[in-house]
Amino acid sequence: MKSKKTVKKFTLASRIKKTLKEQGSYFTGLDAMIEITAGNMYAYFLIMDDVESLDSAEITEKTREGNDKKRIHPAIRELRDQSEMVRRCLRELRLTIATVEGVSDDDMGDLMDSVNSVTE
């Protein structure tokens, strides 16, 4: 399977800042939160790359008694936790679907394209 190129944290931070500026909600006090959000998004994309390479959503472990026990793959759990962290960070920056009221369909499409274009 061909490896995808993950967007770097700096690029994500630049995109977030640009989006905030376009919405008129950017001020310099948000820079730390933008960096935190970009870092969390970067971690999310790295974990997503790992999850995409999995053959199964489960792993099998041996119990003390020697029995097989299936459980969800740890990478999937990490992806779930990291996606929640990203969601919280974006909410702090007011970059949620609920906050884009008044944004045209073209602008919304551009925002979604920007978020979804994590590979180049």
Image (spheres, grey):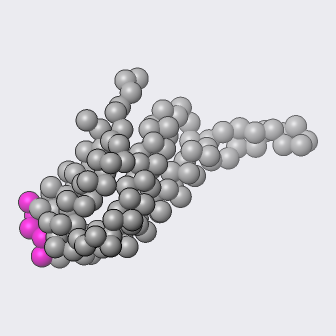
Quick check: can you spot residue 96?
no
Q: Position of residue 99 (x, y in %)?
A: 25, 75
From what the image shows, is residue 37 above or below residue 56?
Answer: below
Question: The N terminus lies in which quarter of the figure?
Answer: top left
Residue 38 image-quadrant placement = bottom left
Single out the residue that lies furthest toward the top.
1
Q: Residue at x 20, y 62 (%)?
A: 19
63 and 2: which is toward the camera: 2
- Name the side, left or right, on which 119 lies relative to 32: left
Q: Is residue 83 left or right of residue 25?
A: right
Q: Residue at x 28, y 70 (%)?
A: 28
- Please tell me whether the stretch drawn in magenta is mainly helix, strand or loop: loop
Furthest residue toward right: 65
Closest to the observer, 82 or 7 = 7
Question: Residue drawn 16% across and 73% down?
Answer: 24
The residue nearer to you, when weighing 19 against 49, is: 19
Image position of 107 with respect to 44: above or below: below
Residue 112 at x, y = what percent? 22, 56
The residue segment tinted magenta is: 102-106
Report the number of discs: 0
Residue that appears at 15% across and 57% down: 109
The quadrant in which residue 64 appears is top right
**Quarter location, residue 48:** top left
Q: For residue 103: magenta? A: yes
Q: Is residue 107 left or right of residue 42?
A: left
Q: Which part of the image, by quadrant, shows the C terminus?
A: top left
Q: Position of residue 96 (x, y in %)?
A: 30, 69
**Residue 78 can be seen in this image:** yes
Residue 9 lies within the magenta run: no
